[in-house]
Image (cartoon, rainbow, N blue to C red):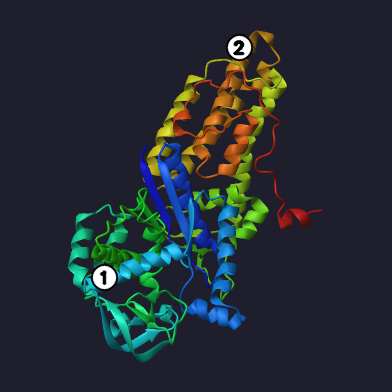
Amino acid sequence: MASFFITTAIDYVNGMPHLGHAYEKVLADAIARWRRSRGDDVFFLTGVDEHGQKVQQSAQKQGVEPQAFCDEMSAHFRRLCERLGTSHDRFARTTEDSHKRVVAQFLQQLHDAGDIYFEEHEGFYSVRQEQFVTEKDMVDGRWPEIFGDVVKTKEPNYFFRMSKYQDWLRTYAEEHPHWIFPSFRRNEILGALEKPLGDLCISRPKSRLSWGIPLPFDPEYVTYVWFDALVNYVSFSKWGQRDCRWPADVHTIGKDILVPAHGIYWTIMLKALGIEQPRRFLVHGWWHLRGEKMSKTTGNVVDPLELIDRFGADAFRYYVLREMAVGQDADFSPENFAQRYRSDLGNDFGNLVNRAISMIRRYRGGNIPSAPIDPDIAAAIHETRDGVAAAMDDFETHRALERIARLTQRANQYVDERAPWRLAKDPALAADLDAVLATLADTVRVLGILAEPFIPHTAARIQQQLGMDKPDFRFAASVPDGRLAGQTVGEPQPLFPRIESPEDRRAP
């Protein structure tokens, strides 16, 4: 059994969960479930980032202690995972004592090695990003909008000798072309390394920011996000234990935090600490709404929980995994979402399952007949299995779902071609009818297995309706072999019931 460790970025608790948070968790969950179906020992880590100036300020505005604010906000992200049906093994919170101990250990190690030094720094500070910036970050003489208000400041702080490792990182990135997926994202790291990195400010004085982890060598300072949040991937991997899971096999993040946070700061931190790098970065794109960038200010946003309330978690999971090619941006269209729900899930997938269960009950009293599987459908199943496996090994969830949709359509076509309702009228064709029903039962079973990483709740309901006592989502079981012969199916239930649109409700 192979070990497999996958992470998501941890979410900052200063705002409510949004579509990007939900997508990243679903993407990582689909990969984790896929690897479990292949027999791997999977460890799936997600969680929240709870320290920092913005959290402290938000707590002050609400008149509560920072920890109470974090407890409340963390619950929203945990609830999102529950609603999405993610199968994570650990939900990280950076206020946990175990995490703080590892952060302090790493800081002390680097300080003892001379990689952290104290210096008075005079320069520019981005209030929005809570970081120091330099004039080289300006574009056409102006600070980019992402930095918000930038003020000049003078403050003594601790710095990490990041510049010391710039040449190493450039060489490492050049020598590991498959380290970043998609591969073109690696060019962003190499591009950033064309300029001198400089050293990284990793502290804030307690007089200005008290909500953070104290430096073990100077309690008058707390460490800033880079040596707090980023360390979570190691600290929550059972670091220091015999069953430690680091390094991450797949480190899932959005494209906006590859450079500099994860692709430069984090990788250099690991190098300085003598810790192995993540084996693969999986970098996904951004979601737009009707072609425009999502923004809370303009109200151009999508609330994933509203969609889940109306359509169900599996419909949401299916849409985002079907529409976004990992690494590229994608457009979220409410109209397209509703169309996918009605067509792909309702009319094709759900209808096929309902037809198969209903006809087995109607024509064979609910008992799945023992009969050979149609060779053409069996061949289509094997082709689909191979296609799904290849796609998921390349993180191409959209292509895997295309394969599943193609098999679903072929199976529905098979029903129309063989017309079991006609076969049932002629006793001489009983064997033909048995073969059709057995083929449909096995096809539906296999589709449930292949679809489980994407729509797990629906996959479980399929196996229940097929009368299977124990769930079996092993990829190895997704072969057409007639194993359901003699099984008694359950009551057919709609998997994706029709949902009225506002236009339907207004219709006379």
The residue labelled by disc 1 is 110
| Element marked by disc 1 | helix
Residue 461 position in % (x across, y down): 62, 37
Residue 65 is situated, as x and y percent measured from the top left of the image, at 57, 77
Q: Give the amino acid type for the residue marked by disc 1 in the picture.
A: Leu
Q: CA distance from mark 2 to mark 1?
A: 74 Å
- In the image, residue 391 sits, relative to residue 122, either above or below, namely above
Q: Nearer the viewer, residue 261 or 407?
A: 261
Q: Is residue 476 left or right of residue 462?
A: left
Camera-nearest residue between 442 and 8: 8
- Which of the image's four quarters has the N terminus? top left
All told, the count of numbered labels is 2
Q: Along the line of sight, which residue is nearer the eye, 121 or 116? A: 116
State the residue position of label 2: 431
Up-down relation of residue 351 to residue 177 (above or below)? above
Q: Residue at x 44, y 76 (%)?
A: 212
Is residue 162 something that shows in the picture?
A: no
Residue furthest to the top in view is 428
Point 48% across, 24% down: residue: 378
How packed mark 2 is, by other alpha carbons closer than 10 Å (few <14, some 14-19, many 20 or more), is some
The residue drawn where x is 30% and y is 80% is: 158
**Amino acid type for the residue under numbered disc 2:** Ala
Q: Earlier in the sequence, mark 2 or mark 1?
A: 1
